[in-house]
Image (cartoon, rainbow, N blue to C red):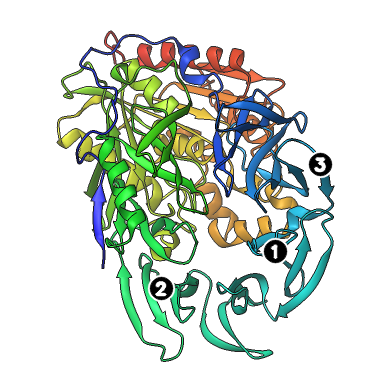
Amino acid sequence: MGVMIRIAVGFLLFACLSGTALAQKVPVEDFFKDPEFSAVTLSPTGEYITVSVPQGDRTLLAAFRVADMELIGKWDYGAQNHADSVRWVNDRRFFVYVSRKLGRYDFRVGTPDVHASDVDGRRRKVIPNGGYFDIVHTLPDDPEHILVQRSVDSAYLFRMNVNSGDVRTVASAPVRFGDFLVDHDGELRYVIGAEENQDNVTLRRDGSSWTEVHRAPMGGATNNPLGFAPDNRMVYTRVSEDGAPTKIFALDADTDEMTLLSENGNVDPYSYLYSSDRRQLLAVRYQDGVPAVDFLDESHAEVGTYAGLMNAFPDHAVAFSGISRDGRYVLAHVYSDVDPGTYYLFDRQTGQARFLLAARSWIKPEQMSPMRAISFTARDGTRVHGYLTVPRNSNGRNLPLILNPHGGPHGIRDTWGFNPEVQFLANRGFAVLQVNFRGSGGYGNAFERKGYRNWGTAMIDDMTDGVEWAVREGIADPERVCTYGASYGGYAALQSIVREPERYRCTIGYVGVYSLPLMFRDGDIPRHESGRSYLARVLPESQAEQQVQSAAFNVDRINVPVMLVHGERDERVPMSQYRALKRALDEAGKPPEVEILARREGHGFQELENNVRLYNAMEEFLNKHIGPGATN
């Protein structure tokens, strides 16, 4: 196994911001206005970058020549459309995957077409239905073509012309939703997919036929090839037994011998770092508390560069977002819990790092509040992890606390890094607790499965146990605790006060689900077969139990002030959810104390004016009930 390097180590190669000033009240606009960029990609030669630029209801794309940062191309795909991801298909041409997002907390829904362009904006072309294809290999020796995959009834591998979008079938496999793996010579070797009965299978290509090498029920064990070592014989493979966190092995394709390369007992791998020629896996990145990188081969020259860059930014995480094909230029994203992030381009030939862009240059890290990883044992003995953010200008004791559950809930988790909402609350004097309750992603399939059908029971209990931990530690004032969340987090915020009516002093539900039975009828999730299957798998089976786990059916247990926030154009969690809870509260003589509705907003507010109104009202509501002058 390799050597694990965590943040907050090492010598200083570049000047990094630090400060000891007490936190000042930062304008709410500074937290919620659009960042200057959301993503950066590096071209294969290192000559160009593309930058995704959020602007209200859309995300633009811009291309710059790195040498002089001259703008050489710009793309606007229209209202509610977002330049989501960019994939370079040769040295000067890229594909842009555009998605639609109708609200801040919406999942981005990919549009069927892909937009192709040269970096200077020439030869723009829309590839019809290109969004249904995933890139498997860019074939560097053939700049006119790439390998792509698409699944219909079976999985297909195609050769696509990057200029015209024309495709030619290379192979097919008897699985649905298949992911193909080719070796460094472009030869087809494996496919990973699912069958009609939802079994996950891995097949090996033997001549012109397929041989099954692994099978397990959905959510069970995994054995998935990830990539090939330089010799095309050793296969980097992801293995999980009985739903435990995934480990990385090297599999000898000739002998089937497995050698352990990397593991973390708590979490799955978060991302992978390859050599510039894409032939060698150099490191595995984990998010076990703070980010950590497990380097697999310390002798590789590029590993020294990566380790040096990590050491250069103490108390920061460094995510490596790209490296030029010749290994000279490295794109590094440097961020922390108090720093929204900056991109640098490091030249390995000169040993110099060049500043490119800052996401929110107006944020002063010395005014932000530190976020620390925590863990505790839940009531049934399960170990649960999360994060605690304590106001910078406090002594960290006897604080008003906000329980802030994440959305999703499955496959999603909270991670260490700059969170504008958490930082806003901490800047206003509140400690913020984020719990990666069972059902969250990233801790192995078994941990996620523990949340299925338990949205309003065991998952809520994990959050409550986190609050009790904070009280026992003396961090939280037991008389000043509120809940706040959005989407599933909004559901959890209300269900927490239903399940624990004596623990909390107030609650805020933002675009939340309040009636589980309505999820099967309203919104965009039940419109599609995949959405209906998801609901059937994760929600309680009987309507009676769905009602038990729904705030709208249990308002008799709600005895604290309620604030409700909703967008009237929300398709993910439609207004029927808000109305169900609002009607039940009104009929019980317990109307919401504060309501904020926005006519033009969807699943989470996007307009700055609406966000300013929301968070000012939230601050006033929280101060009234658990702030310094609150009386209970």
Res 392 quadrant in image: top left
Q: Position of residue 231 (x, y in %)?
A: 45, 78
Q: Position of residue 489 (x, y in %)?
A: 48, 38
Residue 142 marker? 1
From the image, tell me which residue sits under label 2: 239
| In the image, residue 94 above or below residue 315 | below
Q: Secondary structure at mark 2?
A: strand
Residue 193 marker? none
User: Does the rendering let one see residue 56?
Assistant: yes
How much space separates mark 2 and mark 3, taking CA atoms?
A: 41 Å
| In the image, residue 332 above or below residue 252 | above
Cβ atoms under marks 1 and 3 closer than 8 Å: no
At label 3, the amino acid type is: Arg
Which residue appears at 74% of the width and 42% of the height?
Answer: 118
Q: Is residue 360 left or right of residue 521?
A: left
**Badge 3: how crowded within 10 Å, few (<14), some, or many (20+)?**
some
User: Does the rendering let one see residue 523?
Assistant: no
Cβ atoms under marks 2 and 1 closer than 8 Å: no
**Badge 1: how crowded within 10 Å, few (<14), some, or many (20+)?**
few
At label 1, the amino acid type is: Asp
Res 86 quadrant in image: top right
Q: Secondary structure at mark 1?
A: loop
From the image, tell me which residue sits under label 3: 124
Q: Secondary structure at mark 3?
A: loop
Which residue appears at 25% of the width and 22% of the height?
Answer: 18
At label 2, the amino acid type is: Val
